[in-house]
Amino acid sequence: MAISPFSHLATKLFHGLDPESAHEAAIESLALGLGPTAPKDLPALSTRCMGLRFPNPIGLAAGFDKNARAVMGLARMGFGHVECGTVTPRPQDGNPKPRLFRLSEDAAIINRMGFNGCGIDSFVRRLERFRGLQASRSARWRAVPVGANLGINKTGAQPLEDYPYLVSRVSTLADYITINLSSPNTPGLRDLQSASSLGDILNAIGRNNATVPPLLVKLAPDLDPQSLPDIVEAAVEGGASG
Ligand SMILES: Cc1cc2nc3c(=O)[nH]c(=O)nc-3n(C[C@H](O)[C@H](O)[C@H](O)COP(=O)(O)O)c2cc1C
């Protein structure tokens, strides 16, 4: 995509804000329809995976649009998929600020947000609105898979009930679902990555949901490689697609 003078200006403006305010402003702008519009996708970049068609292989990971506020704008700007969330059963504030930091030398950011978000009720209402809009504008809509990334609250979590419940809330709205067990910022979450815990969670999801879109399991990048084969086997046996 060509970088317009407007994009340069927007980048400068965003960098004048602290990282979290810049993030908020970006989401707000996209929700208002102020984002860029990508040119048509090159057909050669399209790919099929999990029964879904991805117009290109570069998607937006979870954590940017945690509350599903800007799905249309993000799709319009050219991502190959948009993953919303992480969403938790109940709203929560997340960790105290500051919790998002620019690493300018590395052109990167680091975060310890702690699953701040609006909770599943508002998330579902927004996805419903988005799907309604999408249906009414289907001719102009750039079709991309929309994923829902699910997590648990910091306090009062019951993973074997929470994940099946969250899946039931989004299963008709999301093209795929990610079970997020990867965050270091929710105490105990990563313990659920053990093969036995993961198997229990996926079985509970299957028992409580007659139909489920493709399920992905999001694991921490720094797991002990020796534990991976058992975890992957549990994921596959539990019906995960990836
Ligand atoms: C500010 C920020 C917030 C994030 N929040 C979430 C989140 O809520 N859920 C999640 O599964 N991953 C979250 N992530 C992780 C990203 O989804 C992604 O896995 C990670 O950034 C690695 O991809 P990258 O190398 O393309 O950045 C977050 C990342 C960042 C930088």
Image: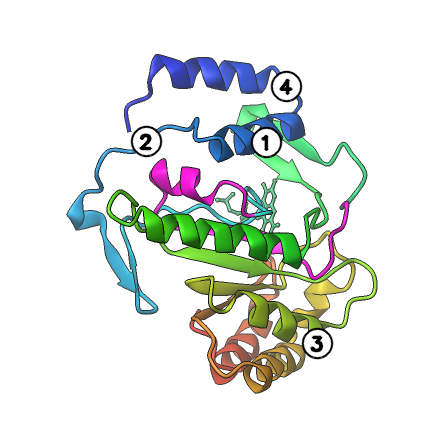
Residue 221 appearing in the image: no
Binning the other alpha carbons within 10 Å of mark 2 as few (below 14), some (14 to 19) or many (20 upward) gives some
Q: Is residue 202 above or below residue 157?
A: below
Discs 4/2, front: 2
Q: Amino acid at mark 3?
A: Glu
Viewer can see residue 141:
yes
* For residue 49, side relative to residue 169 (left or right): left
Asked if ligand 1 lies within 8 A of label 1, the reply is yes
C-alpha span from label 4 to label 3: 40 Å
| Mark 1 / mark 2, whichever is N-terminal | 1
Confirm or reject: label 2 Cβ below 8 Å from ligand 1: no
Residue 85 highlighted magenta (yes or no): yes
What residue does disc 4 label? Answer: 17
- Sequence-earlier tag: 4 or 3: 4
Closer to the eye: label 4 or 3: 3
Asked which secondary structure carries label 3, the reply is: helix
Which residue is outermost to the left? 43
**Among numbered discs 1 and 3, the one appearing first in the sequence:** 1
Mark 1 lies on residue: 23
Q: Which mark is residue 37?
A: 2
Amino acid type at circle 2 is Thr
**Element marked by disc 4:** loop
Q: Label 4: few (<14), some or many (≥20) within 10 Å? A: few
Distance from label 2 to label 3 (Cα)? 40 Å
The residue singled out by tag 3 in the image is 161
